[in-house]
Image: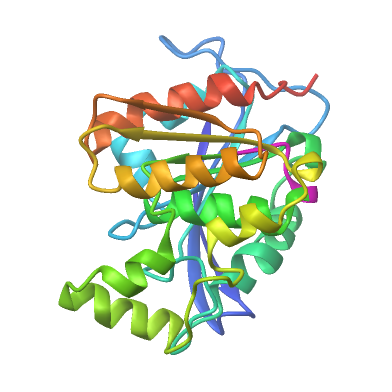
């Protein structure tokens, strides 16, 4: 795999930002790594970071490069700071950046497939929320979406998480609007979605994770509204060894087809 740290200017954010990108390459001569390229542009996974991370975190703390290599899968990891992948009330338009500008930049800079059947999104914690929000608000763009240990109930976080830093964060990102029943609320998006038009969805969360109850509420909402969901809970906390194993599960489930 080629690993690229790409610094570029965002017109939406009106500042310089970055993304880390993995691109498939032939690695027949590299010991311990298998990889291949084809004539067609490779499928692409947008892989989203969590609240305390940046665009380099997945590559630094997991073996995503090695896992993606033998699948011929490109991986795009953008930088969004502590934005909850939202257009912030006091800050940057990170939702618009993610959902509109970023795919255009990726298509312009890199040779990857733009077909919905070849496009996937996943993330951890805040990034799990961002991944499912993107897939639920733009289901026509993705073949599948997955969340690991996702912060999947932001309306609950806004109302009940009284930690000072979270109060300041949600006030800065969302302002004084009530998130329940809005397009920031995944439970609302599930309740109003057409199940037949959604991509495949996956949720995984550790049984020792502090976000377990939020994930259970999302699973229940999907069941109540007939939204197909591959969900699972097993031993694990909110930490990188769980996510390193989890992203392998996600990639196996995505079943991207290498370009030929």
Which residue does the image show at 78% across and 49% down from the upper left? 194
Residue 104 in percent (x, y) is at 74, 61
Residue 108 in percent (x, y) is at 75, 57
The residue range painted magenta reads 140-145
Which residue does the image show at 37% across and 65% down from the upper left? 156
Q: Please check the rendered image and state whether residue 226 is part of the magenta-colored stretch, yes or no.
A: no
* Residue at the farthest front position: 224
In the visual, does 181 lie left or right of 203? right
**In-front residue for pair 28/161:** 161
Split into 4 quadrants, where in the image is the C terminus? top right
In the visual, does 79 lie left or right of 73? left
**In-front residue for pair 247/227:** 227
Mark yes or no: residue 230 visible.
yes
In the visual, does 67 lie left or right of 143? left
The image shows a total of numbered marks equal to 0
* Residue at the farthest left position: 164
Which residue does the image show at 64% across and 55% down from the upper left? 191
Mark yes or no: residue 124 visible.
no
172 shown above or below 71: below
Residue 63 in percent (x, y) is at 37, 28
**In which quarter of the view is residue 225 placed?**
top right
39 shown above or below 165: above
79 shown above or below 113: below
């Amino acid at each position: 795999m080629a690993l690229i740290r790409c610094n570029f200017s965002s017109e939406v954010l009106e500042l310089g930002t970055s993304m880390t990108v993995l691109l498939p390459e032939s690695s027949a001569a590299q010991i311990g790594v298998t990889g291949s390229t084809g004539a067609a542009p490779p499928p692409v996974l947008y892989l989203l970071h969590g609240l305390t991370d940046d665009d380099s975190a997945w590559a630094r703390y997991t073996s995503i490069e090695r896992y993606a290599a033998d699948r011929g899968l490109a991986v795009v990891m953008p930088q969004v700071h502590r934005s909850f992948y939202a257009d912030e009330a006091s800050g940057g338009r990170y939702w618009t950046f993610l959902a509109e500008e970023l795919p255009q930049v990726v298509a312009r800079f890199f040779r990857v497939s733009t077909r919905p059947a070849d496009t996937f999104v996943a993330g951890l914690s805040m990034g799990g929320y961002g991944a499912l929000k993107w897939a639920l608000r733009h289901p026509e763009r993705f073949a599948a979406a997955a969340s690991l240990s996702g912060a999947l109930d932001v309306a609950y976080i806004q109302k009940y998480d009284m930690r000072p830093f979270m109060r300041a964060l949600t006030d800065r990102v969302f302002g004084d609007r009530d998130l329940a029943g809005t397009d920031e609320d995944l439970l609302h998006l599930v309740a109003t979605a057409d199940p037949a038009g959604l991509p495949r969805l996956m949720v995984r969360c550790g049984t020792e994770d502090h976000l377990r109850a939020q994930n259970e509420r999302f699973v229940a909402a999907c069941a109540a509204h007939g939204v197909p969901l591959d969900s699972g809970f097993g031993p694990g906390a909110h930490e990188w060894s769980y996510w390193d194993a989890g992203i392998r599960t996600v990639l196996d489930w995505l079943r991207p087809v290498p370009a030929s």
